Image (cartoon, rainbow, N blue to C red):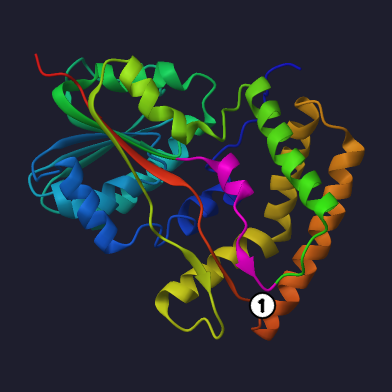
């Protein structure tokens, strides 16, 4: 199977909206406080965000480094870069925020430039994440910090959440698992990344010469309980509604997954069977949400990996 020529354009409405709502309240404030202290983030740092999208990491960590600090966001999408630059006028007070169109494999910055280089949900989408990490390390000053926030979506797919949905048969559960595993093989074969890459980052950083390597996990738990009336509950309700009930987005996501499944060696018939099961679950989910009887509790695997470039 040849490489994909239809990778997502993250500036398209379907994907761009996801960049916003999936990151809303993604990290709890007290978790960010602890992460900033753990990583040694301080005001006045020069930070580079690779695959910055709409500048999420910039405004999330600005309270910890923005006073006298400098943030440089780099993304391959000119449209996202333009939107991020406009939004930064509202949050980048007391320092500077700049945005550039660029390639994660060829950053438009000199060697030993930044105090801190970071990315979030970038490496899992790259055909060659090691090359991107090497480039991030190149622009990092000796003694500087690298931070990668990456999930292990494959392992997360195996986690059984407690919820009000009807129980699938063992046969259907195994089919769902097969689709996840085979689809990821298809992603890799098409050069679209490895959805399980999050747990591989610490070892790769070590192989690339980084020191002081550490890893922590997002402690945010997905929790929905009627009547969904707190700020976190409302955000979670909006998130799952947009992910699951938006027919256009769901079709786009499932069509791509079908391509990945077939590219990984799966049969169209197996995927179409899973899609029918999924359609029935979504209808059940919609009815429960409208009746405000749906409940759920569970979490995924989303890692924060840090390392430092050895000091000269």
Residue 276 locus on image (x, y percent): 87, 55
Please give the name of the residue rendered at 25% of the width and 62% of the height, measured from the top-left corner. Answer: 30
Nearest to the observer: residue 90 or residue 256: 256
Side of 280 where 92 appears, left or right: left
In the image, 7: left or right of 45? right
Please tell me which residue is depicted at 73% across the width and 16% down the height of the picture.
Answer: 2
Neighbour tally class for label 1: few under 14, some 14-19, many 20 plus, Cα within 10 Å:
some
The quarter in which the N terminus is drawn is top right
From this view, report whether residue 78 is shown above or below residue 104: below
Residue at the disc numbered 1: 289
Residue at 83 percent of width and 49 percent of height: 274
Residue in front for this viewpoint, 112 or 93? 112
Magenta segment, which residues? Answer: 151-164
Q: Is residue 8 above or below residue 130?
A: below
x, y (%) of residue 20?
46, 55
The residue that appears at 67% across and 61% down in the rendered structure is 244
Quadrant where the C terminus is found in the figure: top left
Residue 92 in view of the camera? no
| Nearer to me, 82 or 171 | 171
State the image quarter where residue 214 is shown. top left
In magenta segment, residue 112: no
Element assignment for label 1: helix
């Amino acid at each position: 199977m040849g490489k994909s020529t239809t990778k997502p354009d993250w500036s398209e409405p379907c994907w761009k909206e996801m960049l916003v709502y999936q990151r809303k309240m993604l990290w709890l404030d007290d978790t960010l406080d602890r992460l900033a202290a753990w990583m040694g983030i301080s005001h006045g740092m020069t930070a580079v965000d690779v695959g910055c999208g709409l500048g999420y990491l910039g405004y999330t960590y600005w309270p910890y480094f923005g006073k006298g600090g400098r943030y440089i966001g780099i993304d391959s999408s000119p449209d996202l870069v333009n939107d991020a630059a406009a939004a930064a006028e509202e949050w980048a007070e007391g320092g500077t925020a700049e945005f550039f169109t660029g390639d994660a494999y060829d950053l438009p910055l000199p060697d030993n430039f930044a105090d801190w280089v970071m990315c979030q949900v970038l490496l899992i989408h790259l055909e060659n994440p090691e090359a991107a990490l090497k480039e991030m390390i190149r622009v990092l000053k000796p003694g500087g910090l690298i931070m990668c926030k990456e999930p292990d979506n494959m392992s997360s797919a195996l986690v059984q959440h407690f919820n009000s949905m009807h129980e699938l048969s063992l046969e259907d559960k195994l089919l769902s698992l097969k689709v996840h595993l085979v689809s990821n093989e298809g992603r890799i074969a098409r050069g679209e990344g490895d959805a399980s890459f999050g747990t591989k980052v610490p070892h790769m950083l070590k192989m690339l010469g980084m020191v002081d390597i550490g890893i922590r996990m997002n402690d945010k738990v997905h929790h929905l309980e009627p009547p969904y009336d707190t700020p976190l509950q409302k955000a979670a309700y909006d998130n799952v509604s947009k992910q699951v009930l938006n027919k256009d987005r769901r079709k786009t996501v499932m069509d791509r997954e079908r391509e990945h499944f077939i590219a990984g060696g799966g049969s169209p018939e197996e995927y179409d069977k899973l899609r029918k099961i999924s359609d029935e679950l979504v209808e059940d989910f919609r009815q429960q949400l409208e009746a405000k009887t749906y409940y759920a509790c569970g979490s995924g695997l989303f890692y924060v990996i840090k390392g430092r470039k050895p000091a000269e």
